[in-house]
Structure formats: C-alpha cells, structure tokens
Image: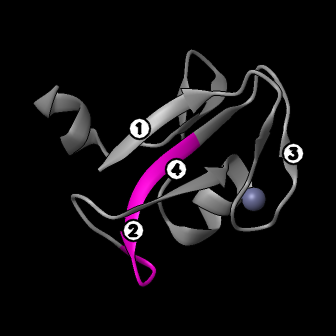
Amino acid sequence: MRRGCISLGRVNCDVCGRVIQYPERYLCIDEENGVEVEKGKMVRYCAGCAFNKGYAHYKEEKGEKTLSFFTETDINQV
Ligand SMILES: [Zn+2]
C-alpha cells in the first residue's frame, strides 16, 4: 500500500539515495521485488523517483501544478 508522507528532514530516498528535505513530500510504498504489494518491504521514494516509476502524477489545480501520489480512484476510495 502507499502512504504519502512529509519529510522532517532526515529521510533518504531508497532509490536515488538523496536526502529528502523538510517539508518535501515523499512516498512510502510496500514492495516485493520491485512490484507494489499490499504488505512487503517498505521503500521510500522521493517525488522525482516516484514520478519516474509511475507512482505519482502531476495535476493542475487552480493554476498550480501539484504532485499527487495517488490515482483518482484511490482518492475516491478514501
Ligand atoms: Zn529519489
């Protein structure tokens, strides 16, 4: 499963290894062998890596581009 988080400044992206600075958003996701699963190894993605992997997309809202970690379907289910 996916969780959108906000960095407090001591988080490293597990993919590219860079430090995710406060208050940047990042994604925690359960993975097994690189595939998203319900319960697996927790992997942290910075915004760029999440986007590259297809876990995030940009949407435009009130003229501002924001990064979303969830699909519209996920949001509707909450
Ligand atoms: Zn990264």
The part of the image, by quadrant, that contains residue 7 is top right
Q: Are marks 4 and 1 in contact (CB under 8 Å)?
A: no
Q: Count residues near mark 2 (Cα–Cα under 10 Å), then give few for <14, some for 14-19, many for 20+.
A: some
Disc nearer the start of the sequence (3/2): 3
Residue, disc 4: 57
**Image quarter hosting the C terminus:** top left
Residue, disc 3: 19
Q: Secondary structure at mark 1?
A: strand
Q: Is residue 14 magenta?
A: no
For the residues carrying marks 4 and 1, which lies nearer the camera in this image?
A: 1
Q: Is 4 or 55 nearer to us in this picture? A: 4
Residue, disc 2: 31
Percent of width and height locating residue 45 = 62, 54
**Residue at 52% over, 50% down:** 57
Q: Are marks 3 and 2 in contact (CB under 8 Å)?
A: no
Q: Amino acid at mark 1?
A: Arg
- The residue range painted magenta reads 27-35
Q: Count residues near mark 3 (Cα–Cα under 10 Å), then give few for <14, some for 14-19, many for 20+.
A: some
